[in-house]
Amino acid sequence: MSDQQLKHKSHRREKRTGKVPSEASHGARGKETTGRTKDSVSTASYMDDLGHHDDNARLVVTIDNTYQLDILKDVLTSYLQEEKYESEWSQKMTKTICEVIRARVKDLMIPRYKIVVLVHIGQLTGQSMQISSRCLWDASNDTFASYSFKNSYLFGVATVFAVYFE
Amino acid sequence: MDDYQTEEEESAFVVEESVEATIGRNTYQHNRVNQWSTSVVEQCLGQLGKLGKPFKYIVNCIIMQKNGAGLQTASACFWDNSTDGSCAVRWENKSMYCIVNVFGLAI
C-alpha cells in the first residue's frame, strides 16, 4: 500500500477593483513517501478600535478561523478514525459530516456571515488528485478554513468558507 | 437582487466550456495537474466575473486520476435560499475525472 503525500500551498492575493480573489489547493501523490499533512492556519489579531462596523467583522473573522479549524479537525477525526472506505457508508458519512460541521459553525453565532461547507471523502488506492479553490470576494471580510485527514484506507478533506453579507 | 437559481444553467455552461478548453484532450499527468486545476478555476472565475452579476463566487475544482478509487463529495450551506445557489459540474475523459462546484452568494 503506497503512502500519499498531501501538500498544502500557501495562498496569495491580488487586488482587482474592490473584489479580491484568493486560492487554496490540496494535492495527493501516489508514491512511497512519508505522509505529511499541513493545514491552513490563521493568526488571531487584536484591534484596538472596534467602533467601525467593518473592523468588527474583520476581527471576528480572524479569530474565528482558528475555531473553525478546531471544529473541522474534531469532526473529521472523530468520524473517520479507523474507518474503512465503503461506497454507501461514505456517501452517508460525507453528508453527515457536512451537516455536523455546518451546525457547529452556526453555533459560533457569528452575525451577518453566510457559510459554505465542502467535504470530500475518498478511497486511497495510490491514485493522484488535486483539489483547488478560488474565490471572487472581499478578502478583508471573507475567509476560509480547511483541514485534511488521512488513515490507511481513506482520506477526508473539509473546507469551510465564510462570506460576509453586506 | 438577482435570483441565482435561474442562472445556474448559465454558470454550468461557463464551467463546462472552461474545463473542456483546459484539459479536454489531455491525459492525467501529476506534474501538470496543479497548473490545470488553477487554470480551470481561474477561467471559470474570470468568465463568471464577466457576467457582471452582483454575486460573490466560490469555485472548487477536483481533478482525480482514474484508478478505480471511490470519491464522495458533499456540501452544506447556510445562506439565503431565494438569492443564493450552487451548481456542480462532473466531467471525465479516459484518464481522469474533473468535478467543479460553483457557489454564488448574492451581495
Image (tube, rainbow, N blue to C red):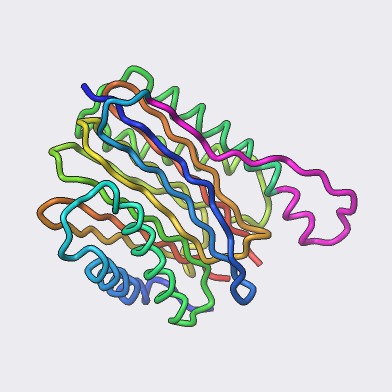
**Which residues, given as a range, are shown in magenta?**
A35-60
As drawn, the residue found furthest toward the top would be A82
- Decide if residue A53 is on the left or right side of residue B103: right
Magenta region, mostly helix, strand or loop? loop
Q: Is residue A73 left or right of residue B90?
A: right
Spot occupied by residue B89 in the image (x, y as percentages of width and height)? 27, 61
Residue in view at x 50 percent, y 29 percent:
A73
In this rendered view, identify the residue nearer to me: A114 or B38: B38
Question: What is the count of numbered marks?
Answer: 0
The residue lying at 66 percent from left, 44 percent from top is A109
Residue A45 is covered by the magenta coloring: yes
- Give the quarter of the image for residue A45: top right
Q: Position of residue A75 (x, y in %)?
A: 47, 29
Q: Residue A74 or A144: which is nearer the viewer?
A: A144
Q: Position of residue A136 (x, y in %)?
A: 52, 66
Side of B21 relative to A114 (left or right):
left
Q: Position of residue A10 (x, y in %)?
A: 53, 47
Instruction: Confirm whether the magenta stretch covers residue B51.
Output: no
Q: Is residue A123 above or below residue A141?
A: above
Q: Is residue A29 above or below residue B23?
A: above
| Residue at 32% from the left image edge and 77% from the top image edge | B10
Above or below, B106 against A78 in this view is: below
Q: Nearer the viewer, residue A108 or A127?
A: A127
Residue furthest out toward the left: B94
Quadrant of the drawing holding the N terminus of chain A: top left
- In the picture, the quarter occupied by the C terminus of chain A is bottom right
Q: Residue furthest front?
A: B31
